[in-house]
């Protein structure tokens, strides 16, 4: 029973000590100006090349179904 009391006392002391240490002042807020993000847009055809290539590869893979004859 004394082990339990010692453990409880140490736990209580650690909890109260940590709570007091963390309850200190907070750092002042740093206010910064918002940064503008400028994105350069490419041509509309550049956004279509990759999907068209993928569609062509999928169509080629679907069309070339090889049958194995024994």
Image (tube, helix red, strand yellow):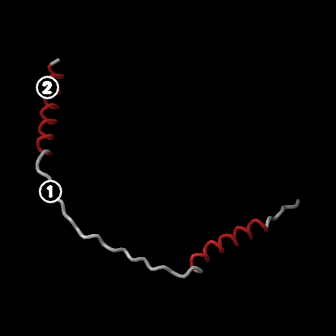
- Residue under the image location 16 percent in, 36 percent down: 15
**Does 11 sit left or right of 42 as displayed?**
left
**Does 7 sit left or right of 36 as displayed?**
left
Residue 65 percent coordinates (x, y) = 80, 64
In the rendering, which numbered label is found on residue 6? 2
Circles 2 and 1: CB atoms closer than 8 Å: no
Q: Earlier in the sequence, mark 2 or mark 1?
A: 2
Does residue 28 lie above or below 48 as drawn? above
The image quadrant that residue 2 belongs to is top left
Does residue 32 lie above or below 42 as drawn? above
Given residues 44 and 17, the one toward you in this image is 44
Residue 33 percent coordinates (x, y) = 25, 70
Does residue 43 lie above or below 68 as drawn? below
- Residue under the image location 81 percent in, 65 percent down: 66
The image quadrant that residue 50 belongs to is bottom right
The C terminus - image quarter:
bottom right
**Does 39 sit left or right of 65 as displayed?**
left
The image quadrant that residue 10 belongs to is top left
Residue placed under numbered mark 1 in the picture: 27
Query: For the residue labelled by badge 2, is the local secondary structure a helix, a strand or a loop?
Result: helix
Q: Residues within 10 Å of mark 2 (few under 14, many from 20)?
A: few
Residue 47 percent coordinates (x, y) = 57, 76
């Amino acid at each position: 029973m004394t082990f339990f009391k010692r453990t409880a006392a140490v736990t209580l002391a650690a909890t109260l000590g940590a709570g007091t240490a963390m309850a200190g002042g907070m750092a002042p807020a740093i206010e910064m100006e918002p940064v503008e993000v400028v994105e350069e847009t490419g041509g509309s055809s550049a956004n279509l090349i990759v999907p068209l290539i993928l569609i062509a590869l999928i169509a080629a893979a679907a069309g070339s179904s090889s049958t194995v004859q024994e």
